[in-house]
Amino acid sequence: MTAAALLSQFVQLALALALAPLLVGWVNQCRAWLSNRSAPPLTLPYRTIRKLFMKDAVVASNASPLFRLTPYVVFGAMCCAAAIVPSLATDLPFALAADAIALVGLFALARVFIALAAMDIGTAFGTLGARREMFVGFLAEPALLMVLFTASLISGSTSLPSIVDTLAHRELAIYPSLALAGVAFTMVSLAENARIPVDNPATHLELTMIHEAMLLEYSARHLALIEWASALKLFNYSCIGLALFFPFGIAQGSDDWLAIALAVPVLVAKLAAGGFALAVIETASAKMRIFRAPEFLGTAFLLAVLAMLVRLLLGS
């Protein structure tokens, strides 16, 4: 492990931490433009996080240490995921740990902790949000695994760098199975990041909110870390989708600084296009009832399984 490789890993993680709130701000701006409303500033998520860090935390008297520990665990899990996902280069020090199953495990770890913390205080909203979050995760994680397994069948490995290297740096090939997997991944990403049509991140209504219901008891630095982690989760899912379905522009070596420097503007451009596409989907869709979520995620799972069967039986 060379110093250049470690520096490349640090650059990728620092870029994820810096760009994640910007991606959220860009999506909010695009949604406002498409709805013919005045757009909020692009830097509003940064200002919100900074304001929360400067406030004093208010914690319930019956809160356990788990409630205080959860924001740091969730933020740490999202940082580890950002270091694992090959967004700039494939040959990074964390490449040995960049397994698709481990990545899903990090997302599951963050979900379990935030759900336990939501139920820790004993409020009705927290318990409601935790049960809904686990319900969505129970349906979304198998579909996400099937998508990753479909991509792993192409490369013969569950290692994310190997998958990206196969899709981006080898002979050009068209894989119909990835088209089905791409649709399934988009549906899973919407559900996992609390976006329309499964959830609405801009509402606090009892009948609709899932993710926001678990955060009502948090404040100050704890809430800032969770909000930053939520932005990182959206960034990570975006980078996973770009690495699997649009892998061009990712550097192959960690010591090729020219390739890494060129990969940064390519990543920003792809994230901007993906953020606009997400805003279009949310603007054109309506929030569905929570009881329709099994149908939505069940369809995603069936598409992912169909993609894997197409790859296994037809080799395409």
Image: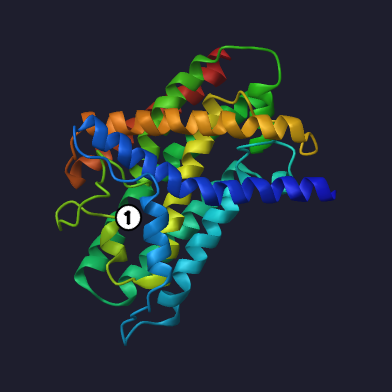
Identify which residue, 221 or 150, lies in the foreground: 221
Q: Residues within 10 Å of mark 1 (few under 14, many from 20)?
A: many
- Which quadrant of the figure contains the C terminus? top right
Q: Amino acid at mark 1?
A: Glu
Q: Secondary structure at mark 1?
A: helix
Q: Position of residue 159 (x, y in %)?
A: 66, 38
4 sits to left or right of 184? right
Between residues 16 and 79, which one lies in front from this camera angle? Answer: 16
Q: Is residue 147 visible?
A: no
Q: Quadrant of residue 85?
A: top right
Could you tell me residue 276's position as x and y percent?
36, 30
- Single out the residue that lies furthest toward the right: 2
Question: Residue 252: image x %, image y %?
Answer: 73, 30
As drawn, is 213 to the left or to the right of 143? left
Q: Disc 1 marks which residue?
A: 133
**Is 171 on the left-hand or right-hand side of 302?**
right
Seen at 30% across and 56% down, the residue is 211
The x, y position of residue 184, in whole percent, is: 40, 30
Can residue 282 be seen in the rendering of this structure?
yes
**Along the line of sight, the residue nearer the viewer: 84 or 178:** 84
